[in-house]
Image (spheres, rainbow, N blue to C red):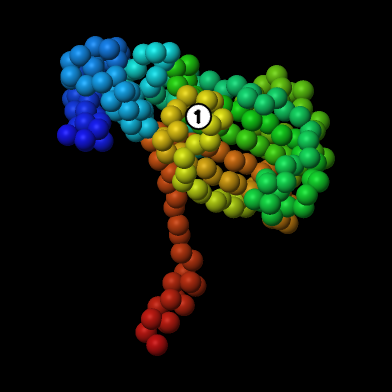
Amino acid sequence: MTEDGKIETLTSTLRERIKRGDFGTDGRLPPVTQLAKDYQMSRTTIYQALLLLQSESLLTARGNSYFVNYPIMRIPGAPLFDKFMEKQGLTPIVDNVVEPEVIQMPVEVAKAFEQPEGLHVVHRMRRHGIIEIPYRLVENWYPADLAAQFLDTMKQDPNLNVLGEIRKAHGLSWAKRHDDIIARLPTEKETQLLNIVRTTPIIEIRQQWLTHEDRVLLFNVTILIAAYFQLSYDTEKQKKQEETTTTDQSS
């Protein structure tokens, strides 16, 4: 059997054992040395199989040990993260990866959001999860003239609802949001911050939050570990659109 074949066979075997509950729902797998002995395979083959199972979020690594993460929790949409965690009896954790500060929006970010270069923004980056597992990264850019006054509070409270503060201070509320969703593999920095391997699929959501007058209140990039999240969208056709479609189809 080829090396790739051995890896696939071992991955399939361990996957079935995990789903069957052989290691419990949060159990620790035997050490790599023991697995190599049990399955008569090299440590390299064992590591490759474990990496694949990590990429499927069936395993999490803590130090040099591997723990089962099954059944995988499916979080219904990024905005509901905290409330969903609490309903599961878990305590959501958030920390500032990058402390809030006023900067010029990076060129690549300005291009992604089709904004002019040199725009001054309040920038912050946070990591959300539970004590054992980080689930997502959230990076925000707010117009500096609207959000700079909340810098100190943002540093003290990573959970601060800045859009809510902008509404109270400036009377501006978001009315529209544009989302771009991209599936990709993580960068090296993202693998470190989320404690995942480079083969783990992630979802990147870029959002612009706008007022009725199209003033941008927030640029937002959220990085989700794909295996943990379920994104749901409801679409409702207007009656006029339906009538137009019916007419077009019948003519």
Dot 1: what SS?
A: helix
Q: Quadrant of residue 88?
A: top left
Q: Is residue 233 positioned above or below 106 on the image?
A: below
- In the foreground, 9 or 88: 9
Picture coordinates of residue 230 (x, y %)?
40, 40
Single out the residue that lies furthest toward the front.
2
Task: Read off the residue under disc 1.
Answer: 191
| Residue at 18% across, 20% down | 39
- In the foreground, 91 or 241: 91
Picture coordinates of residue 64 (x, y %)?
39, 13
- In the foreground, 91 or 247: 91
Q: In this view, does 40 lie to the left or right of 117?
A: left
| Residue at 64% across, 23% down | 96
Report how many numbered discs are placed on residues in the image. 1
The amino acid on which the numbered mark 1 sits, given as a three-letter code, is Thr
Would you call the spot at circle 1 few (<14 residues within 10 Å), some (14-19), or many (20 or more)?
Answer: some
Asked if residue 27 can be seen in this view, the reply is no
Q: Is residue 189 left or right of residue 170?
A: left
Picture coordinates of residue 115 (x, y %)?
73, 52
Q: In this view, does 109 lie to the left or right of 17?
A: right
| Residue at 41% across, 15% down | 62
Q: Is residue 97 positioned above or below 165 on the image?
A: above
| Residue at 70% across, 19% down | 156
Quadrant where the N terminus is found in the figure: top left
